Amino acid sequence: MKTIDRDHSFVVYISHCWLRGWPGADGYDKRPHPDNASADKFKLCVEGISKTLKIMAPGAKKCYLWLDFGCMDQDGNPAGELKQLDEIVRNADCIFT
């Protein structure tokens, strides 16, 4: 994370359980997805990040998110990318689970 201005940025690490990750899950449409059909998890993340920014980093100019669904190749080799997980977590200002 050498390219991020850490003095004016806030980094959030988000790891979570998939709500539509298996056949039989409510709203499952043969494509695994981390959120439900109403996007409740997304709404919760937006609200949580907004509140956390105001409390923990009110002067931050940028907020960076590391979201396992969007930042890991789910079809390739996700386990291979976990080798960098300690560095990702170490650089986070906040962790959502």
Image: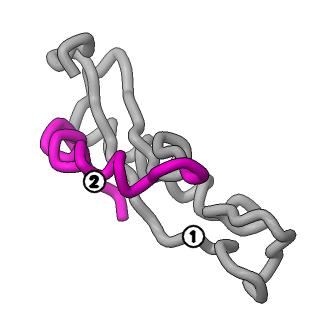
Q: CA distance from mark 2 to mark 1?
A: 17 Å
Q: Is residue 66 above or below residue 86?
A: above
**Residue in front for this viewpoint, 53 or 62:** 62
Residue 95 image label: 2
Q: Residue at x 59, y 62 (%)?
A: 41
- Which sits in the foreground, 23 or 45? 23
Marks 2/1 in contact by CB < 8 Å: the verdict is no
Q: Is residue 6 left or right of residue 49?
A: left
- Disc 1 target residue: 18
**For the view shown, which residue lies furthest in the bottom direction?**
24
The x, y position of residue 22, in whole percent, is 69, 79
- Residue 70 lies left or right of residue 1; in this view the side is right
Q: Secondary structure at mark 1?
A: loop
The front one of 86 and 94 is 86
Q: Left or right: where does residue 93 sit relative to residue 44?
A: left
Residue at screen point 35% across, 58% down: 96
In this figure, what is the number of numbered marks? 2
The vertical placement of 18 against 73, above or below, is below
Disc 2 element: strand
- Report x, y in % for residue 84: 24, 43
Residue at 69% across / 73% down in the picture?
Answer: 20
In front of the other: 12 or 3: 3
Relative vertical location of residue 45 with respect to residue 54 in this rendering, above or below: below
Q: Is residue 84 magenta?
A: yes
Indicate the position of residue 3 as horizontal and vertical percent values.
25, 11
Identity, as a three-letter code, of the amino acid under mark 1: Trp
Q: Residue at 41% across / 37% down in the picture?
A: 65
Where's the C terminus, which quadrant?
bottom left
Marked residue nearer the N-terminal end (2 or 1)? 1
- Please check the rendered image and state whether residue 14 is part of the magenta-colored stretch, yes or no: no
Q: Which residues are magenta?
A: 74-97
Q: Quadrant of residue 29?
A: bottom right
